[in-house]
Each structure stands twice: as structure tokens, then as C-alpha cells.
Image (cartoon, grey):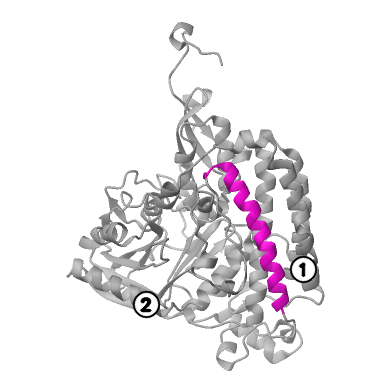
Amino acid sequence: MCDMGAREVENMTDLIKAVRSAFPDAVQEIVEYRGETTLVVDPAHAKSILRYLKEERGFNYLADVSSAHWPDEGRIDVVYLPRSLKTAEQVRIRVPLPVEDPSIETVADIWRTADWLEREVYDLMGVTFIGHPDLRRIMLPEEFDGHPLRKEYPMEGDDEWRNFLPVKDTDDDQL
Amino acid sequence: MTSYNRERLDLNTEAVTVNMGPQHPATHGVLRVVLTLDGEVVLAARPDVGYLHRGIEKIAENKTLHQVVPYTDRMDYLSPISNNIGLALAVEKLIGFDITEKCRVMRVVCCEMARISSHILWLATTALDIGAGTVYFYCFTEREKIYDLFERMTGARFTVSYGRIGGLARDWEPGLSEDILAWANQCHKALDECERLLTRNPIWIDRTQDVGPISAEDAIDLGLSGPNLRASGVEWDLRKAYPYLGYDRYDFEVPVGEHGDCYDRYLVRLEEMRQSVRIIQQAMKEYDPDQPLFPQDPESEKVFLPNKQRVLTKMEELIHQFIVATEGPKTPRAKEIYFALEAPKGELGFYLVGSGTNVAHRCHFRSPSFVNLQGLPIMVKGQMVADVIATIASLDPVLGEVDR
């Protein structure tokens, strides 16, 4: 059910070879699990690899942008899932970032769908996307403190409600 | 048409900013759209989401995987069964267990019933938003029949929590499969009636044709999925692209639109319902009530829930059920998978990362409505305010899923 056909695996090896030859030092690791290929990529080259995938290899659709926090290793992974709607190929690009300064260049200029997906990662995980057109919180209010999907963020807190400013009577209300 | 000379009439020509929502009935939940208007023409629209954010991903990362099932109901609450089954399939992929043939068939039937119930509610509310009140009653009559079947199947009508890792919550009672088939065989009547009311209705056509259009390039670039993507002429269906649950064995077509406007999105959804009926009819031929719902091999029995009937009658099985339900399956550490299924709204993706324990390290839900809503600004630019209502409705966002 979740296995890929032999042809697709062959295509995937072609793809990995092509990425490796175009960016010799960028791919740190290749993981195969349940028929899915993950390329662990150096943050400095991540954007150029993603641009290469879209422009040279026909990965015209960005299915997902996600993230994962690994407090013990001190890193935050940003995970992209580009896909080609023509050949149904997809590959996962995982970019490890240091937890002290998790920032990476935006891909919103490559796929516009990354706009909101990156805002979600910024809001909930606290990753800064450099050059993003409109980097604001999307789920939580602008004045919220902290990033809930980080592992150190508590499940139950005692003063979260302070993050929500009380509604004040102002002159604007007279409208 | 009269043309006005604005300067001579001394009209105020500043752009006006108007808030549509978050409590507007036609935004289908708590969606706020900030509109910049020149008279009645939309210059820019900025959707503002997050009013219904409950941190479902954070909760899911602190519960065993069995306990996450009811939370998925509350994402897209108009097709909860698809969400349950999507989560179950994702977890099964992560831990590497297979399910039985009967379970696969039952899940296909459930998914397609959820698709019809979601689309038929969409048709009802969209028609109501646009002003065609009659359609609402035909659709709700039909939806009521589906919900009666869901009630018999799951014990609940709305948030069903029917999916289980490795199977489904319980077997179908005797006679239910015949009733589902009987309902499926008459379902086309309601669809035909709605079609007669709308498809050639001049008011419906005026309100939907060339309203909220989006090109195929834009739709792909913005990550639209499901009927919204297909209405723009992109033939992309996860049931065909990455067949899961044995969808490759069923004979069905993927309806594709041409113009990407509200009218095409309506036609695509209408045809999808008919195709779903076909899938249900085919699946029912393969349904065999005597087969087991859960896998019977000893390895699977340690992970999946035991047969509900035996749990209710035998002590050992009750203890077994207790252990499986409280412990849940162990996830492999630092292994990651992404599983997406074709939910009624589009691509519902689950990105799971294992932790080595029974709690997932990372549970990310890629919800179709969230991504689809990004298309709204492009669709409504240059259109009238009234068209914004029609366009939001035609995108079929469910805000429980957008905000999670």
C-alpha cells in the first residue's frame, strides 16, 4: 500500500544523483523509510536546492511545510514536501537549524503556497523566514508570547491568559 | 448602463476598508476577511484566520495515538470519518502494520459517504448563501439519511470517532450494508433534483459563472487541492496518484473543470458525489460480513484493539482492550512519514514523527481548507462584494480545520 513501484524508486535515485552533482556538499544524509525519501540538507543550500527542484525537475507543487523541535539535539527541523503533479514524484527536504537562532530563507517566492505555511511554522515553532513578504503570526494573536509547539512550552500553564490583552474602551468604539 | 462622472458628482472615491466577519454567517465559521473596496469593487482581500485555534497539534503530541482520534473529528467536522481514517492510515504506515481486506472495504465506503455528506452540505449552504433557499431542504433531507446511517454505524451522528488504528471502532450491524447500498442506489434522485434546480438556473449561473476564477497555474502555485484544484482543470486526485485503501481497484472518474470559477467548482463537486456513489456500489460487492475486522496474527493483536463483541463478553479480551487502549502503539524513534488522503475538501496530510514511545514526537496536520483559503485574495480581486460571499462558499472552507 505504501510501497512505491520499482520505476519510481529508480527515478528517485536519479533525482538524488542529480541533486548531489548539482550541490556536492549540500546533502548531509539520505533517509529511506516506508518508501519515502528524505534528504537532509545544509541550511545554506536549502533554498537553491528547492529552487532547483521546481525549475529543473518539475516539482511544481509544495504540498507541505512543517517543523519538528528536538531539544536534546538542540535543533529545529524545517521540513518541505515538494511534489511534481505530472509524475507524482515527491521528496522530503529536511533542514536542521540551530535552536538558538532558527532562521532560514523563505521559499514563498518559489511557491506562493509557502506564504501561509511558513507563517504557521513561524507562529507555532518560532522559525524566522528571511525575506518572507508578510511574516506575522497566523493562528495566535500578535501579542502572544512564546511558540507553543516548542517542546519546552508547557501543556498547561498558569498565566497564558495574560497574553490576551483586555479589550479597552477607546474613542474608536464610538464609531 | 449609465456612466457616472465621479468628479462632477463630487463622490467620495477613497478606498474603504470593510471587515467581513468573523461573525458573518456566510463565512462558514469564524473567518474574517479584511476587504479594501472601491465602491462595490474589491481591490484587495486579506483573510485573517486563527479564531478557532485550539492547539490540536500540541495536544496530539501529548496523548497516545488512540487518544488523538476524537481530536481529528473536530478538525473538518463535516467529514469526521475521513479524518479518523486518515490518522489511522498514517499511524499504520508509521508503525508498519497492515489492515484486513474487509476493513479496507469498510473504510472506502465510510470515506465516500463522508464525501457525499460533506459535498451535499456544501451544496445546501452555498445555494443558501447565494439565495437559492429551496436546494437547502432537498440536500438536508438527503444528508439526514446519511446521518441516520452514520448513527447506526458509529453510534453518533456528527463527531463519530469511528476510525481506530488497525481497523474501525466496531463491525456493522446485520442489515446495515444492505441499507447503505439501498441508500446509495437512490442517492442520485436528490442530486438530480438539485441539478434541475441549479445547473441551468439563470440566477445561479449569473451568480457563479466567471465569479472567483483562478487559473490552473495559480491554483498549483498556491497549493490548492481537492475539487478547487480540479475545477481549474488540473487532473489530480490522491486516490489515483497514490492509491491507498485499494482505490486502484475501483472504477471511477476524476471530474475536472475548465474555468476554475464558482460554477465549475459546483459542477465538479456534483459529479464527485455521483462518482462516490459508484465507488460505494462497487465496494459493497466486495464487502463480506463474515471476515474479521482486525488482523488476527499475534503481532498485530498486541498493537490493535481486540474484537468489540468479545471484549463485551470475555474478561481476558477486556483486559487486553484496556492495555492496548491505554498504551497504544509504540512509534519508532525519529522516523518520519507523511500520509495524505483525498478528503472531501482536498489533500488532508498527516506528518508524523516517532518518538520511541507511544506518543508521537511531532503530529502535523496539513489541512486542505487552510491552504485553499490562500487562493481567496486572487479569486476575488476585481470582483464585487457579493461575489466574495459566493467565492468563500465555493472554496468550502471549514474553519475548525483551518485553525486546528
Determine the secondary structure under disc 2. Answer: helix
**Horizontal and vertical percent position of residue A166:** 48, 40
Q: Residue B309 lies in what quarter of the image?
A: bottom right
In the picture of the structure, the residue carrying the numbered disc 2 is: A9
When the figure is inspected, residue B177 is found, relative to residue B264, above or below; the finding is below
Determine the secondary structure under disc 1. Answer: helix
At 64% across and 72% down in the image, what residue appears? B107
Q: Are marks 1 and 2 in contact (CB under 8 Å)?
A: no
Along the line of sight, which residue is nearer the eye, B106 or B173?
A: B106
In the picture of the structure, the residue carrying the numbered disc 1 is: B181
Along the line of sight, which residue is nearer the eye, A144 or B378?
A: B378
Are the residues under badges 1 and 2 in a single subunit? no
Q: Is residue A19 visible?
A: yes
At 45% across and 49% down in the image, what residue appears? B216
When the figure is inspected, residue A152 is found, relative to residue B139, above or below; the finding is below
Along the line of sight, which residue is nearer the eye, A32 or A122?
A: A32
Give the spatial CA distance, label 1 vs label 2.
40 Å
Q: Chain of mark 2?
A: A
| Disc 2 crowd, CA 10 A, few/some/many (<14, 14-19, 20+) | some
**Horizontal and vertical percent position of residue B390:** 59, 38
Q: Which residues are magenta?
A: B259-287
Side (left or right) of B160 relative to B339:
right
Side (left or right) of A33 relative to B206:
left
Q: Chain of mark 1?
A: B
At 58% across and 71% down in the image, what residue appears? B247
**Tag on residue B291?**
none
- Main secondary structure type of the part rendered in magenta: helix
User: Which amino acid type corresponds to the residue marked 2 in the rendered image?
Assistant: Val
Q: Residue B78 lies in what quarter of the image?
A: bottom right
When the figure is inspected, residue B367 is found, relative to residue B181, above or below; the finding is above
